[in-house]
Amino acid sequence: MTVRKSKFDKVSREQFMKSDKSLLGHTFKPISLNEDDICLLYDYESNEYFGIVKIGLFENNLTFRENPIPEVQGVYDGRYSKYSKYEISVKEFYPFKMNIEKLIKVLKINSKEPNNIVKNSNTSSFGSLYYRPKDDDGTEHNRVIDTFTFIIETMMENIETEAKILKDKIQVLEKEFKKSRMFE
């Protein structure tokens, strides 16, 4: 599982949150995405992560497809419709909030060093995470990325376990409800 990041501003975040959350949009063909990759949704204006998605597949077994009329339909509208050129399949969406200042303390990193974990970088959306402190032989980069990936993977395992428990409870309640309706 690869952990990636996609950046939003206030308006694009709002448009995504109003959608059915089954698609993400992008201006370029995101060929490096694989099914079950994890993508953190980052709002650079509020400086927080606000959700996490698991990438899915379309019927063509690709994680993306070209939107034939992005200016008419898509996740984003107005000046943001350019981000609907390619649609990315979202298998699951989980909202959460992670404050960047707290994350900096947990990861023990210098936020001024080149990275796309805790700051708005110019890297394209859906890129892999990176942290490149000066004079690093790769040890610090690996420690930070491994730690953050571990946090996200653990969080996903817990979220998915809780989601399964809730689905099971809903199914039981639905069966009980149907049973009770039979005797009315």
Image (cartoon, helix red, strand yellow):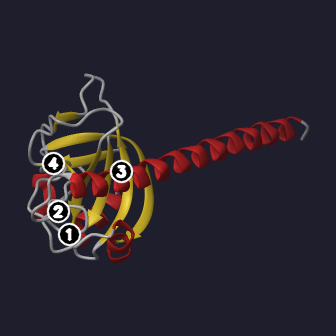
Q: Nearer the viewer, mark 2 or mark 1?
A: 2
Residue that label 3 marks: 149
Q: CA distance from mark 2 to mark 1?
A: 7 Å
Task: Determine crowd level at label 3: few under 14, some 14-19, many 20+ residues with C-alpha closer than 10 A.
Answer: some
Q: Secondary structure at mark 3?
A: helix
Where residue 87 sits, quadrant-wise, is: top left
Q: Which residue has dot 4 on it?
A: 26
Question: Of callouts 1 and 3, which one flags the residue occurring earlier in the amino acid sequence?
Answer: 1
Among the 4 quarters of the image, the one containing residue 13: bottom left
Judged from the image, the secondary structure of the residue bearing numbered disc 4 is: strand
Q: CA distance from mark 1 to mark 3?
A: 17 Å
Answer with mark 1 or mark 4, whichever residue precedes in sequence.
4
Amino acid tagged 2:
Asn
Q: Is residue 65 above or below residue 120?
A: above
Residue drawn at (27%, 33%) of the image: 34
The residue pinned by badge 1 equals 119
Q: Is residue 27 above or below residue 31?
A: below
In the image, what residue occupies the spot 38% across and 59% down?
51
Measure the C-alpha gap from mark 4 to mark 2. 21 Å
User: Which residue appears farthest toward the right when viewing the image?
Assistant: 183
Q: Nearer the viewer, mark 1 or mark 4?
A: 1
